Amino acid sequence: MPELRELYQELILDHGKRPRNFGKLEGANCQANGYNPLCGDKITVYVNVDDNIIQDLRFEGVGCAISTASASLMTEKCKGKSLQEAETLFHLFHELLTGEVGEESAAELGKLSVFSGVKEFPVRVKCATLPWHTFRSALQGIGEVVIKE
Amino acid sequence: MIPSGTTSQVRMPASEPLSAFNVWRVREDFPILKTQVYGKPLVYLDNAATSQKPQGVLDALNRFYAQECANVHRGLHWLSELATQDYEDARVKVQRFLGAAEAREIIFVRGATEAINLVAHSYGRKYVQAGDEILITAMEHHSNIVPWQILCQEQGARLRVAPINDAGELILEEFQKLLNSRTRLVAVGHVSNALGTVNPVRQIIQMAHNHNIPVLVDGAQAVPHLKVNVQELDCDFYAFSGHKFYGPTGVGVLYGKVRWLEEMPPYQGGGDMISAVTFEKTTYNSLPYKFEAGTPHIAGGIGLGAAVDYVSEVGLNQIAAYEHELLAYAARQVSRIPGLRIIGTAREKAGVISFVLEGLHPHDIGTILDREGIAVRAGHHCAMPVMERFGVPATTRASFACYNTQEEVDALVAGIQKVQEVLA
Ligand SMILES: Cc1ncc(COP(=O)(O)O)c(C=O)c1O
Protein backbone atom coordinates (compact mmCIF):
# COMPACT_ATOMS: atom_id res chain seq x y z
CA MET A 1 0.00 0.00 0.00
CA PRO A 2 2.83 2.53 0.31
CA GLU A 3 2.64 3.36 -3.41
CA LEU A 4 -1.09 3.87 -3.13
CA ARG A 5 -0.62 6.33 -0.28
CA GLU A 6 2.08 8.02 -2.33
CA LEU A 7 -0.40 8.32 -5.18
CA TYR A 8 -3.49 9.30 -3.26
CA GLN A 9 -2.00 11.87 -0.94
CA GLU A 10 -4.24 14.04 1.22
CA LEU A 11 -3.71 17.04 -1.00
CA ILE A 12 -4.75 15.08 -4.10
CA LEU A 13 -7.80 13.61 -2.43
CA ASP A 14 -8.79 17.03 -1.15
CA HIS A 15 -8.50 18.68 -4.57
CA GLY A 16 -10.07 15.65 -6.21
CA LYS A 17 -13.16 16.00 -4.07
CA ARG A 18 -13.29 19.77 -3.75
CA PRO A 19 -11.68 21.13 -6.87
CA ARG A 20 -10.80 24.82 -6.81
CA ASN A 21 -11.60 27.11 -9.72
CA PHE A 22 -14.24 24.66 -10.89
CA GLY A 23 -16.93 25.84 -13.28
CA LYS A 24 -17.19 27.86 -16.41
CA LEU A 25 -15.24 31.10 -16.75
CA GLU A 26 -17.50 33.67 -18.33
CA GLY A 27 -15.76 35.81 -20.87
CA ALA A 28 -12.75 33.55 -21.23
CA ASN A 29 -10.72 34.45 -24.29
CA CYS A 30 -9.17 30.99 -24.71
CA GLN A 31 -10.66 27.61 -24.07
CA ALA A 32 -10.17 23.99 -25.06
CA ASN A 33 -11.74 20.60 -24.49
CA GLY A 34 -9.64 17.63 -23.48
CA TYR A 35 -10.69 14.06 -23.68
CA ASN A 36 -9.12 10.80 -22.64
CA PRO A 37 -11.00 8.04 -24.44
CA LEU A 38 -9.34 5.35 -22.35
CA CYS A 39 -11.17 6.31 -19.17
CA GLY A 40 -13.78 8.75 -20.42
CA ASP A 41 -12.28 11.76 -18.66
CA LYS A 42 -13.52 15.01 -20.15
CA ILE A 43 -12.34 18.46 -19.25
CA THR A 44 -12.82 21.99 -20.47
CA VAL A 45 -10.22 24.58 -19.53
CA TYR A 46 -11.10 28.29 -19.70
CA VAL A 47 -8.40 30.92 -19.68
CA ASN A 48 -8.40 34.65 -19.69
CA VAL A 49 -5.11 36.00 -21.00
CA ASP A 50 -4.34 39.66 -20.97
CA ASP A 51 -1.03 41.41 -21.41
CA ASN A 52 0.78 38.08 -21.65
CA ILE A 53 -0.50 37.17 -18.18
CA ILE A 54 -2.96 34.43 -17.25
CA GLN A 55 -5.48 36.60 -15.50
CA ASP A 56 -7.91 33.86 -14.74
CA LEU A 57 -8.13 30.14 -15.23
CA ARG A 58 -10.98 27.73 -14.51
CA PHE A 59 -12.04 24.26 -15.57
CA GLU A 60 -15.00 21.94 -15.60
CA GLY A 61 -15.58 18.32 -16.52
CA VAL A 62 -15.66 14.82 -15.17
CA GLY A 63 -12.61 12.86 -14.27
CA CYS A 64 -10.87 10.65 -11.77
CA ALA A 65 -9.35 11.92 -8.56
CA ILE A 66 -5.95 12.31 -10.22
CA SER A 67 -7.11 14.32 -13.20
CA THR A 68 -9.49 16.48 -11.17
CA ALA A 69 -6.83 17.24 -8.57
CA SER A 70 -4.30 17.91 -11.27
CA ALA A 71 -6.65 20.39 -12.95
CA SER A 72 -7.48 22.05 -9.67
CA LEU A 73 -3.86 22.47 -8.57
CA MET A 74 -2.91 23.59 -12.07
CA THR A 75 -5.42 26.42 -11.99
CA GLU A 76 -4.17 27.53 -8.58
CA LYS A 77 -0.58 27.42 -9.69
CA CYS A 78 -0.90 29.12 -13.04
CA LYS A 79 -3.20 31.99 -12.22
CA GLY A 80 -1.19 35.20 -12.46
CA LYS A 81 1.71 33.55 -14.27
CA SER A 82 3.04 34.71 -17.61
CA LEU A 83 2.60 32.56 -20.67
CA GLN A 84 6.30 31.68 -20.61
CA GLU A 85 6.11 30.65 -16.97
CA ALA A 86 3.10 28.48 -17.71
CA GLU A 87 4.96 26.81 -20.57
CA THR A 88 7.92 26.11 -18.27
CA LEU A 89 5.60 24.61 -15.66
CA PHE A 90 4.00 22.40 -18.31
CA HIS A 91 7.40 20.91 -19.12
CA LEU A 92 8.47 20.59 -15.50
CA PHE A 93 5.25 18.84 -14.63
CA HIS A 94 5.79 16.45 -17.48
CA GLU A 95 9.28 15.68 -16.25
CA LEU A 96 7.98 15.11 -12.76
CA LEU A 97 5.65 12.42 -14.04
CA THR A 98 8.07 10.68 -16.33
CA GLY A 99 11.46 10.99 -14.67
CA GLU A 100 13.41 12.69 -11.95
CA VAL A 101 13.35 16.41 -11.34
CA GLY A 102 16.09 18.31 -9.56
CA GLU A 103 15.66 20.22 -6.33
CA GLU A 104 15.38 23.52 -8.10
CA SER A 105 12.60 22.28 -10.35
CA ALA A 106 10.84 20.70 -7.41
CA ALA A 107 10.90 24.05 -5.66
CA GLU A 108 9.45 25.66 -8.73
CA LEU A 109 6.70 23.07 -8.95
CA GLY A 110 5.79 23.62 -5.30
CA LYS A 111 2.56 21.86 -4.41
CA LEU A 112 2.51 20.19 -7.82
CA SER A 113 5.29 17.90 -6.60
CA VAL A 114 2.57 15.97 -4.83
CA PHE A 115 2.03 14.19 -8.17
CA SER A 116 5.44 12.55 -8.16
CA GLY A 117 3.83 9.29 -6.99
CA VAL A 118 1.99 8.99 -10.31
CA LYS A 119 5.26 7.83 -11.88
CA GLU A 120 4.78 4.46 -10.27
CA PHE A 121 1.46 4.09 -12.09
CA PRO A 122 2.30 4.52 -15.77
CA VAL A 123 -1.28 4.10 -16.96
CA ARG A 124 -2.30 7.02 -14.77
CA VAL A 125 0.21 9.53 -16.10
CA LYS A 126 -2.26 10.64 -18.76
CA CYS A 127 -4.87 11.36 -16.10
CA ALA A 128 -2.53 13.89 -14.53
CA THR A 129 -1.37 15.44 -17.79
CA LEU A 130 -4.76 15.75 -19.50
CA PRO A 131 -5.58 19.11 -17.83
CA TRP A 132 -2.17 20.47 -18.73
CA HIS A 133 -2.41 19.40 -22.36
CA THR A 134 -5.85 20.95 -22.53
CA PHE A 135 -4.63 24.16 -20.91
CA ARG A 136 -1.75 24.40 -23.34
CA SER A 137 -4.05 23.78 -26.30
CA ALA A 138 -6.31 26.56 -25.10
CA LEU A 139 -3.35 28.94 -25.04
CA GLN A 140 -2.27 27.83 -28.48
CA GLY A 141 -5.74 28.32 -29.86
CA ILE A 142 -6.35 24.62 -30.42
CA GLY A 143 -9.88 23.82 -29.38
CA GLU A 144 -9.71 20.05 -28.93
CA VAL A 145 -7.16 17.64 -27.55
CA VAL A 146 -7.60 13.95 -27.38
CA ILE A 147 -5.02 12.02 -25.44
CA LYS A 148 -4.09 8.96 -27.41
CA GLU A 149 -2.48 5.80 -26.26
CA MET B 1 -6.59 -31.62 -14.17
CA ILE B 2 -8.51 -32.34 -17.29
CA PRO B 3 -6.26 -34.24 -19.64
CA SER B 4 -6.40 -32.84 -23.11
CA GLY B 5 -7.55 -35.20 -25.76
CA THR B 6 -9.46 -37.51 -23.46
CA THR B 7 -12.86 -36.99 -22.00
CA SER B 8 -13.44 -40.09 -19.97
CA GLN B 9 -12.45 -38.82 -16.56
CA VAL B 10 -14.32 -35.61 -16.53
CA ARG B 11 -17.44 -35.92 -18.60
CA MET B 12 -20.27 -35.46 -16.18
CA PRO B 13 -23.66 -36.88 -16.89
CA ALA B 14 -26.23 -34.13 -17.33
CA SER B 15 -28.21 -35.52 -14.42
CA GLU B 16 -25.39 -35.03 -11.97
CA PRO B 17 -26.12 -32.37 -9.34
CA LEU B 18 -24.59 -28.94 -9.59
CA SER B 19 -22.05 -29.65 -6.91
CA ALA B 20 -20.39 -31.93 -9.44
CA PHE B 21 -18.89 -28.77 -10.89
CA ASN B 22 -15.67 -28.53 -8.99
CA VAL B 23 -14.30 -25.06 -9.53
CA TRP B 24 -11.07 -25.89 -7.75
CA ARG B 25 -10.40 -28.69 -10.15
CA VAL B 26 -11.21 -26.42 -13.08
CA ARG B 27 -8.75 -23.84 -11.76
CA GLU B 28 -5.98 -26.41 -11.95
CA ASP B 29 -6.36 -26.35 -15.72
CA PHE B 30 -5.41 -22.67 -15.97
CA PRO B 31 -1.72 -22.19 -15.21
CA ILE B 32 -1.94 -18.39 -15.07
CA LEU B 33 -4.28 -18.53 -12.09
CA LYS B 34 -1.31 -19.36 -9.88
CA THR B 35 0.20 -15.96 -10.63
CA GLN B 36 0.87 -13.53 -7.82
CA VAL B 37 0.58 -9.82 -8.50
CA TYR B 38 2.11 -7.36 -6.04
CA GLY B 39 2.61 -10.36 -3.77
CA LYS B 40 -1.09 -11.23 -3.79
CA PRO B 41 -2.91 -14.01 -5.58
CA LEU B 42 -4.28 -12.90 -8.92
CA VAL B 43 -8.03 -12.40 -8.86
CA TYR B 44 -8.87 -12.23 -12.53
CA LEU B 45 -12.24 -10.59 -13.07
CA ASP B 46 -11.70 -9.14 -16.54
CA ASN B 47 -12.98 -12.11 -18.49
CA ALA B 48 -15.24 -10.07 -20.73
CA ALA B 49 -12.08 -8.45 -22.10
CA THR B 50 -10.38 -11.77 -22.57
CA SER B 51 -10.48 -15.07 -20.72
CA GLN B 52 -7.51 -17.11 -19.57
CA LYS B 53 -6.47 -20.24 -21.43
CA PRO B 54 -6.51 -23.80 -20.15
CA GLN B 55 -3.49 -26.06 -20.50
CA GLY B 56 -5.20 -28.01 -23.29
CA VAL B 57 -5.34 -24.92 -25.46
CA LEU B 58 -1.73 -24.00 -24.68
CA ASP B 59 -0.69 -27.54 -25.52
CA ALA B 60 -2.56 -27.47 -28.82
CA LEU B 61 -0.81 -24.25 -29.85
CA ASN B 62 2.54 -25.64 -28.87
CA ARG B 63 1.90 -28.96 -30.55
CA PHE B 64 1.08 -27.26 -33.80
CA TYR B 65 4.23 -25.20 -33.86
CA ALA B 66 6.47 -27.91 -32.44
CA GLN B 67 5.22 -30.90 -34.37
CA GLU B 68 3.02 -30.08 -37.32
CA CYS B 69 3.76 -26.59 -38.54
CA ALA B 70 2.94 -26.26 -42.22
CA ASN B 71 0.63 -24.23 -44.38
CA VAL B 72 -2.87 -25.54 -44.98
CA HIS B 73 -4.63 -26.48 -48.21
CA ARG B 74 -1.41 -26.01 -50.15
CA GLY B 75 1.03 -28.81 -49.67
CA LEU B 76 1.00 -32.32 -50.87
CA HIS B 77 3.43 -33.20 -48.17
CA TRP B 78 2.80 -35.04 -44.97
CA LEU B 79 3.06 -32.06 -42.59
CA SER B 80 0.73 -29.93 -44.65
CA GLU B 81 -1.84 -32.66 -44.74
CA LEU B 82 -1.57 -33.04 -40.99
CA ALA B 83 -1.97 -29.32 -40.40
CA THR B 84 -4.89 -29.14 -42.83
CA GLN B 85 -6.56 -32.07 -41.14
CA ASP B 86 -6.25 -30.51 -37.69
CA TYR B 87 -7.39 -27.13 -38.90
CA GLU B 88 -10.43 -28.60 -40.62
CA ASP B 89 -11.16 -30.76 -37.57
CA ALA B 90 -11.30 -27.58 -35.54
CA ARG B 91 -13.87 -26.22 -37.97
CA VAL B 92 -16.02 -29.29 -37.46
CA LYS B 93 -15.69 -28.94 -33.68
CA VAL B 94 -16.95 -25.37 -33.91
CA GLN B 95 -19.73 -26.44 -36.25
CA ARG B 96 -20.97 -29.06 -33.81
CA PHE B 97 -20.56 -26.76 -30.87
CA LEU B 98 -22.73 -24.10 -32.51
CA GLY B 99 -25.16 -26.63 -33.87
CA ALA B 100 -24.56 -25.48 -37.43
CA ALA B 101 -25.87 -27.64 -40.25
CA GLU B 102 -22.60 -27.78 -42.18
CA ALA B 103 -18.90 -27.15 -41.58
CA ARG B 104 -18.71 -24.82 -44.58
CA GLU B 105 -20.93 -22.39 -42.71
CA ILE B 106 -18.07 -21.82 -40.25
CA ILE B 107 -15.66 -19.14 -41.44
CA PHE B 108 -12.51 -18.55 -39.47
CA VAL B 109 -11.77 -14.87 -39.00
CA ARG B 110 -9.70 -12.73 -36.66
CA GLY B 111 -12.43 -12.23 -34.11
CA ALA B 112 -15.96 -10.96 -33.62
CA THR B 113 -14.91 -7.59 -34.99
CA GLU B 114 -13.72 -9.03 -38.27
CA ALA B 115 -16.76 -11.28 -38.51
CA ILE B 116 -19.06 -8.27 -38.28
CA ASN B 117 -16.95 -6.26 -40.70
CA LEU B 118 -17.05 -9.16 -43.15
CA VAL B 119 -20.84 -9.11 -43.15
CA ALA B 120 -20.99 -5.32 -43.32
CA HIS B 121 -18.60 -5.34 -46.23
CA SER B 122 -19.88 -8.29 -48.19
CA TYR B 123 -23.58 -8.57 -47.40
CA GLY B 124 -23.78 -4.81 -46.89
CA ARG B 125 -22.40 -3.74 -50.22
CA LYS B 126 -24.56 -6.19 -52.06
CA TYR B 127 -27.89 -5.72 -50.35
CA VAL B 128 -27.89 -2.29 -48.72
CA GLN B 129 -28.77 0.66 -50.91
CA ALA B 130 -29.56 4.33 -50.43
CA GLY B 131 -32.59 4.77 -48.22
CA ASP B 132 -32.26 1.32 -46.66
CA GLU B 133 -31.89 0.79 -42.94
CA ILE B 134 -29.77 -1.28 -40.59
CA LEU B 135 -31.24 -1.84 -37.15
CA ILE B 136 -29.08 -2.28 -34.04
CA THR B 137 -29.71 -1.77 -30.33
CA ALA B 138 -28.56 0.85 -27.85
CA MET B 139 -26.40 -1.65 -25.98
CA GLU B 140 -24.05 -2.68 -28.76
CA HIS B 141 -20.27 -2.88 -28.52
CA HIS B 142 -18.52 -0.40 -30.81
CA SER B 143 -17.65 -3.29 -33.10
CA ASN B 144 -21.36 -3.79 -33.78
CA ILE B 145 -21.94 -0.09 -34.36
CA VAL B 146 -19.06 1.35 -36.34
CA PRO B 147 -19.00 -1.14 -39.28
CA TRP B 148 -22.69 -0.37 -39.85
CA GLN B 149 -22.07 3.34 -39.58
CA ILE B 150 -19.36 3.10 -42.21
CA LEU B 151 -21.62 1.03 -44.45
CA CYS B 152 -24.52 3.43 -44.03
CA GLN B 153 -22.33 6.40 -44.82
CA GLU B 154 -21.04 4.77 -47.97
CA GLN B 155 -24.38 3.56 -49.23
CA GLY B 156 -26.50 6.45 -48.07
CA ALA B 157 -28.39 4.14 -45.75
CA ARG B 158 -29.64 4.86 -42.26
CA LEU B 159 -28.60 3.32 -38.95
CA ARG B 160 -31.55 2.88 -36.59
CA VAL B 161 -31.11 2.16 -32.91
CA ALA B 162 -33.66 0.35 -30.75
CA PRO B 163 -33.71 1.81 -27.23
CA ILE B 164 -33.16 0.08 -23.89
CA ASN B 165 -34.87 0.63 -20.54
CA ASP B 166 -33.34 1.66 -17.21
CA ALA B 167 -32.55 -1.93 -16.36
CA GLY B 168 -30.55 -2.24 -19.55
CA GLU B 169 -33.08 -4.39 -21.39
CA LEU B 170 -34.05 -3.97 -25.00
CA ILE B 171 -37.54 -2.46 -25.31
CA LEU B 172 -39.08 -5.01 -27.64
CA GLU B 173 -42.11 -2.92 -28.58
CA GLU B 174 -39.82 -0.14 -29.78
CA PHE B 175 -37.65 -2.65 -31.59
CA GLN B 176 -40.76 -4.02 -33.30
CA LYS B 177 -41.78 -0.55 -34.42
CA LEU B 178 -38.42 0.03 -36.06
CA LEU B 179 -38.68 -3.05 -38.27
CA ASN B 180 -39.96 -2.03 -41.67
CA SER B 181 -39.73 -2.73 -45.38
CA ARG B 182 -36.52 -0.74 -45.69
CA THR B 183 -34.69 -2.69 -42.96
CA ARG B 184 -32.03 -4.80 -44.63
CA LEU B 185 -30.42 -6.30 -41.56
CA VAL B 186 -30.78 -6.51 -37.78
CA ALA B 187 -27.49 -6.69 -35.87
CA VAL B 188 -27.86 -7.43 -32.19
CA GLY B 189 -25.66 -8.49 -29.32
CA HIS B 190 -26.54 -11.77 -27.65
CA VAL B 191 -25.05 -10.67 -24.33
CA SER B 192 -24.02 -7.09 -23.59
CA ASN B 193 -20.41 -6.71 -22.52
CA ALA B 194 -21.11 -3.48 -20.63
CA LEU B 195 -24.30 -4.50 -18.84
CA GLY B 196 -24.44 -8.28 -18.90
CA THR B 197 -27.94 -8.24 -20.38
CA VAL B 198 -28.93 -11.41 -22.22
CA ASN B 199 -31.07 -10.38 -25.15
CA PRO B 200 -34.05 -12.51 -26.17
CA VAL B 201 -32.42 -13.22 -29.52
CA ARG B 202 -34.76 -16.06 -30.41
CA GLN B 203 -37.70 -13.70 -30.21
CA ILE B 204 -35.81 -10.87 -31.92
CA ILE B 205 -34.95 -13.16 -34.81
CA GLN B 206 -38.56 -14.29 -35.16
CA MET B 207 -39.76 -10.71 -35.19
CA ALA B 208 -37.23 -9.78 -37.86
CA HIS B 209 -37.92 -12.89 -39.93
CA ASN B 210 -41.61 -12.03 -39.95
CA HIS B 211 -40.49 -9.09 -42.05
CA ASN B 212 -38.03 -11.24 -44.02
CA ILE B 213 -35.12 -9.39 -42.46
CA PRO B 214 -31.95 -11.39 -41.76
CA VAL B 215 -30.29 -11.13 -38.35
CA LEU B 216 -26.67 -11.05 -37.30
CA VAL B 217 -26.03 -11.97 -33.68
CA ASP B 218 -22.87 -10.71 -32.00
CA GLY B 219 -22.17 -13.60 -29.66
CA ALA B 220 -18.77 -12.47 -28.36
CA GLN B 221 -20.02 -12.41 -24.76
CA ALA B 222 -22.50 -15.24 -25.11
CA VAL B 223 -20.61 -18.33 -26.24
CA PRO B 224 -18.48 -18.60 -23.09
CA HIS B 225 -21.55 -18.47 -20.85
CA LEU B 226 -24.53 -20.11 -22.46
CA LYS B 227 -25.39 -22.84 -24.90
CA VAL B 228 -25.87 -21.50 -28.39
CA ASN B 229 -27.52 -23.41 -31.19
CA VAL B 230 -27.60 -21.41 -34.39
CA GLN B 231 -30.22 -23.60 -36.02
CA GLU B 232 -32.57 -23.34 -33.08
CA LEU B 233 -32.02 -19.60 -32.97
CA ASP B 234 -32.43 -19.53 -36.75
CA CYS B 235 -30.00 -16.59 -36.91
CA ASP B 236 -28.55 -15.76 -40.30
CA PHE B 237 -25.12 -14.83 -38.97
CA TYR B 238 -23.42 -15.45 -35.64
CA ALA B 239 -20.08 -13.89 -34.66
CA PHE B 240 -17.71 -14.60 -31.80
CA SER B 241 -14.07 -14.34 -30.73
CA GLY B 242 -11.91 -17.27 -29.67
CA HIS B 243 -10.05 -15.34 -26.99
CA LYS B 244 -13.09 -14.64 -24.83
CA PHE B 245 -13.91 -18.32 -25.00
CA TYR B 246 -10.73 -19.78 -23.44
CA GLY B 247 -9.11 -19.85 -26.87
CA PRO B 248 -6.22 -17.96 -28.43
CA THR B 249 -6.30 -14.33 -29.52
CA GLY B 250 -6.42 -13.58 -33.22
CA VAL B 251 -9.01 -16.14 -34.18
CA GLY B 252 -12.77 -16.02 -34.23
CA VAL B 253 -15.75 -17.33 -36.10
CA LEU B 254 -18.41 -16.11 -38.43
CA TYR B 255 -21.26 -18.53 -38.82
CA GLY B 256 -23.47 -17.80 -41.80
CA LYS B 257 -26.32 -19.66 -43.42
CA VAL B 258 -25.18 -21.22 -46.68
CA ARG B 259 -27.79 -19.36 -48.67
CA TRP B 260 -26.32 -16.00 -47.66
CA LEU B 261 -22.69 -17.05 -47.87
CA GLU B 262 -23.24 -18.43 -51.36
CA GLU B 263 -24.80 -15.20 -52.56
CA MET B 264 -22.37 -12.85 -50.87
CA PRO B 265 -19.29 -11.61 -52.72
CA PRO B 266 -15.85 -12.28 -51.21
CA TYR B 267 -14.56 -10.05 -48.43
CA GLN B 268 -10.86 -10.07 -49.26
CA GLY B 269 -9.02 -11.34 -52.29
CA GLY B 270 -5.92 -13.48 -52.29
CA GLY B 271 -4.68 -17.01 -52.06
CA ASP B 272 -6.95 -19.84 -50.88
CA MET B 273 -10.14 -17.97 -51.78
CA ILE B 274 -9.84 -18.71 -55.48
CA SER B 275 -10.20 -21.82 -57.58
CA ALA B 276 -8.77 -20.37 -60.80
CA VAL B 277 -7.12 -17.08 -61.64
CA THR B 278 -6.27 -15.53 -64.98
CA PHE B 279 -5.72 -11.83 -65.55
CA GLU B 280 -9.12 -11.68 -67.19
CA LYS B 281 -11.14 -13.50 -64.59
CA THR B 282 -11.03 -15.23 -61.25
CA THR B 283 -13.29 -18.03 -60.17
CA TYR B 284 -13.84 -18.03 -56.45
CA ASN B 285 -13.34 -21.01 -54.26
CA SER B 286 -16.24 -22.76 -52.61
CA LEU B 287 -17.36 -22.16 -49.03
CA PRO B 288 -15.91 -21.51 -46.54
CA TYR B 289 -12.66 -20.75 -48.39
CA LYS B 290 -14.23 -18.01 -50.48
CA PHE B 291 -14.10 -15.92 -47.29
CA GLU B 292 -10.71 -17.04 -46.05
CA ALA B 293 -8.16 -15.26 -48.20
CA GLY B 294 -4.53 -15.79 -47.36
CA THR B 295 -2.84 -18.02 -44.83
CA PRO B 296 -5.18 -18.21 -41.86
CA HIS B 297 -4.29 -18.28 -38.18
CA ILE B 298 -3.78 -22.02 -38.32
CA ALA B 299 -2.52 -22.49 -34.78
CA GLY B 300 -5.31 -20.22 -33.60
CA GLY B 301 -7.97 -22.29 -35.32
CA ILE B 302 -6.56 -25.46 -33.83
CA GLY B 303 -6.33 -23.76 -30.43
CA LEU B 304 -9.95 -22.67 -30.73
CA GLY B 305 -10.84 -26.29 -31.47
CA ALA B 306 -9.06 -27.24 -28.23
CA ALA B 307 -11.07 -24.60 -26.38
CA VAL B 308 -14.27 -26.12 -27.74
CA ASP B 309 -13.04 -29.50 -26.49
CA TYR B 310 -12.29 -28.06 -23.10
CA VAL B 311 -15.64 -26.35 -22.66
CA SER B 312 -17.44 -29.46 -23.89
CA GLU B 313 -15.54 -31.61 -21.41
CA VAL B 314 -16.32 -29.39 -18.46
CA GLY B 315 -19.83 -29.01 -19.82
CA LEU B 316 -21.29 -25.70 -20.89
CA ASN B 317 -24.51 -26.36 -19.03
CA GLN B 318 -22.55 -26.96 -15.85
CA ILE B 319 -20.54 -23.81 -16.47
CA ALA B 320 -23.68 -21.79 -17.13
CA ALA B 321 -25.37 -23.01 -13.97
CA TYR B 322 -22.27 -22.41 -11.86
CA GLU B 323 -21.69 -18.93 -13.26
CA HIS B 324 -25.33 -18.07 -12.76
CA GLU B 325 -25.02 -18.81 -9.05
CA LEU B 326 -21.74 -16.98 -8.83
CA LEU B 327 -23.16 -13.91 -10.53
CA ALA B 328 -26.17 -13.90 -8.21
CA TYR B 329 -23.84 -14.20 -5.23
CA ALA B 330 -21.66 -11.37 -6.51
CA ALA B 331 -24.66 -9.12 -7.16
CA ARG B 332 -25.93 -9.73 -3.62
CA GLN B 333 -22.58 -9.10 -1.97
CA VAL B 334 -21.63 -6.11 -4.04
CA SER B 335 -24.97 -4.34 -3.75
CA ARG B 336 -24.60 -4.30 0.05
CA ILE B 337 -21.73 -1.86 -0.28
CA PRO B 338 -22.94 1.63 0.62
CA GLY B 339 -22.95 4.07 -2.27
CA LEU B 340 -22.63 1.35 -4.89
CA ARG B 341 -24.99 1.22 -7.84
CA ILE B 342 -25.08 -1.65 -10.29
CA ILE B 343 -25.48 -0.49 -13.91
CA GLY B 344 -27.45 -3.12 -15.79
CA THR B 345 -30.05 -4.94 -13.76
CA ALA B 346 -31.77 -6.94 -16.47
CA ARG B 347 -33.73 -10.01 -15.40
CA GLU B 348 -31.60 -12.15 -17.69
CA LYS B 349 -27.92 -11.54 -17.20
CA ALA B 350 -24.68 -13.35 -17.80
CA GLY B 351 -21.09 -12.90 -16.78
CA VAL B 352 -20.93 -9.21 -15.94
CA ILE B 353 -21.40 -6.80 -13.05
CA SER B 354 -20.88 -3.17 -13.96
CA PHE B 355 -21.06 -0.66 -11.15
CA VAL B 356 -20.41 2.88 -10.06
CA LEU B 357 -19.44 4.05 -6.58
CA GLU B 358 -20.77 7.36 -5.43
CA GLY B 359 -18.15 10.10 -5.61
CA LEU B 360 -15.44 7.75 -6.85
CA HIS B 361 -14.17 7.42 -10.36
CA PRO B 362 -13.77 3.94 -11.91
CA HIS B 363 -10.22 4.72 -12.85
CA ASP B 364 -9.22 5.26 -9.22
CA ILE B 365 -11.15 2.14 -8.23
CA GLY B 366 -9.36 0.11 -10.89
CA THR B 367 -5.92 1.28 -9.74
CA ILE B 368 -6.53 0.42 -6.10
CA LEU B 369 -8.12 -2.95 -6.89
CA ASP B 370 -5.14 -3.70 -9.11
CA ARG B 371 -2.81 -3.27 -6.14
CA GLU B 372 -4.92 -5.83 -4.34
CA GLY B 373 -4.24 -8.24 -7.17
CA ILE B 374 -7.75 -7.82 -8.57
CA ALA B 375 -8.05 -7.31 -12.31
CA VAL B 376 -11.23 -5.50 -13.36
CA ARG B 377 -11.96 -3.17 -16.22
CA ALA B 378 -12.58 0.51 -15.62
CA GLY B 379 -13.80 2.55 -18.52
CA HIS B 380 -16.50 2.70 -21.14
CA HIS B 381 -16.05 -0.92 -22.27
CA CYS B 382 -16.19 0.01 -25.95
CA ALA B 383 -19.82 0.92 -25.42
CA MET B 384 -19.83 4.68 -25.09
CA PRO B 385 -23.50 5.01 -26.05
CA VAL B 386 -24.36 2.73 -23.12
CA MET B 387 -22.44 4.99 -20.73
CA GLU B 388 -24.28 7.96 -22.19
CA ARG B 389 -27.62 6.21 -21.75
CA PHE B 390 -26.93 5.68 -18.04
CA GLY B 391 -25.41 9.13 -17.56
CA VAL B 392 -22.04 7.89 -16.33
CA PRO B 393 -18.65 8.55 -17.90
CA ALA B 394 -17.43 5.07 -17.13
CA THR B 395 -18.07 2.09 -14.91
CA THR B 396 -16.04 -0.51 -13.11
CA ARG B 397 -16.75 -3.96 -14.47
CA ALA B 398 -16.15 -7.32 -12.89
CA SER B 399 -16.70 -10.13 -15.37
CA PHE B 400 -16.66 -13.81 -14.59
CA ALA B 401 -15.53 -17.10 -16.07
CA CYS B 402 -15.93 -20.71 -15.06
CA TYR B 403 -12.82 -20.60 -12.84
CA ASN B 404 -13.87 -17.71 -10.63
CA THR B 405 -14.88 -18.47 -7.06
CA GLN B 406 -17.01 -17.05 -4.28
CA GLU B 407 -13.76 -16.34 -2.45
CA GLU B 408 -12.73 -14.11 -5.33
CA VAL B 409 -16.04 -12.28 -5.12
CA ASP B 410 -15.32 -11.77 -1.41
CA ALA B 411 -11.88 -10.43 -2.34
CA LEU B 412 -13.55 -8.00 -4.73
CA VAL B 413 -15.90 -6.80 -2.01
CA ALA B 414 -13.01 -6.37 0.42
CA GLY B 415 -11.09 -4.58 -2.32
CA ILE B 416 -13.94 -2.14 -2.89
CA GLN B 417 -14.03 -1.46 0.83
CA LYS B 418 -10.32 -0.75 0.65
CA VAL B 419 -10.96 1.67 -2.20
CA GLN B 420 -13.43 3.54 -0.05
CA GLU B 421 -10.91 3.60 2.77
CA VAL B 422 -8.02 4.88 0.66
CA LEU B 423 -10.09 7.50 -1.11
CA ALA B 424 -12.10 8.57 1.93
C1 LIG C 1 -20.19 -7.78 -27.25
C2 LIG C 1 -18.88 -7.72 -27.97
N1 LIG C 1 -18.87 -7.72 -29.29
C3 LIG C 1 -17.72 -7.68 -29.98
C4 LIG C 1 -16.51 -7.61 -29.35
C5 LIG C 1 -15.27 -7.53 -30.18
O1 LIG C 1 -14.47 -8.63 -30.00
P1 LIG C 1 -12.99 -8.65 -30.59
O2 LIG C 1 -12.32 -7.42 -30.06
O3 LIG C 1 -12.41 -9.89 -30.03
O4 LIG C 1 -13.10 -8.66 -32.06
C6 LIG C 1 -16.47 -7.60 -27.97
C7 LIG C 1 -15.17 -7.51 -27.27
O5 LIG C 1 -14.99 -6.78 -26.32
C8 LIG C 1 -17.69 -7.66 -27.26
O6 LIG C 1 -17.70 -7.65 -25.93
Image: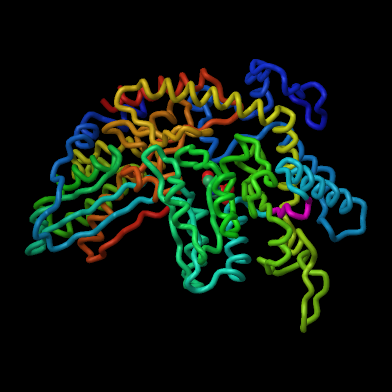
Toward the viewer: B347 or B58? B347
In magenta, the rendered stretch is: B102-108
Above or below residue A120? Residue B250 is below
Inspect this view and state whether residue A97 appears. no
- In the rendered structure, does residue B105 fall within the stretch colored magenta? yes
Q: Position of residue A75 (x, y in %)?
A: 16, 47
Q: Position of residue A137 (x, y in %)?
A: 25, 60
Toward the viewer: B405 or B14? B14
Q: Position of residue B392 (x, y in %)?
A: 32, 42
Most distant residue in the front direction = B210
Q: Position of residue B197 (x, y in %)?
A: 48, 38
Whether residue A50 sits left or right of residue B77 in the image: it is: left
Tally of numbered tags? 0
Point out the image quarter for the N terminus of chain A. top left
Above or below residue A31? Residue B129 is below
Q: Quadrant of residue A134?
A: bottom left
Above or below residue A120? Residue A80 is below
Toward the viewer: A87 or B15? B15
Whether residue A5 sits left or right of residue B181 in the image: it is: left
- In the rendered structure, does residue B100 fall within the stretch colored magenta? no
Q: Quadrant of residue B423?
A: top left
Toward the viewer: A86 or B82? B82
Q: Residue at x 72, y 37 (%)?
A: B57
Inspect this view and state whether residue B167 appears. yes
Q: Residue at x 22, y 29 (%)?
A: A10
Q: Residue at x 49, y 24 (%)?
A: B328
Whether residue A61 sits left or right of residue B351 in the image: it is: left
Q: What coloring was used for the rendering? A: rainbow
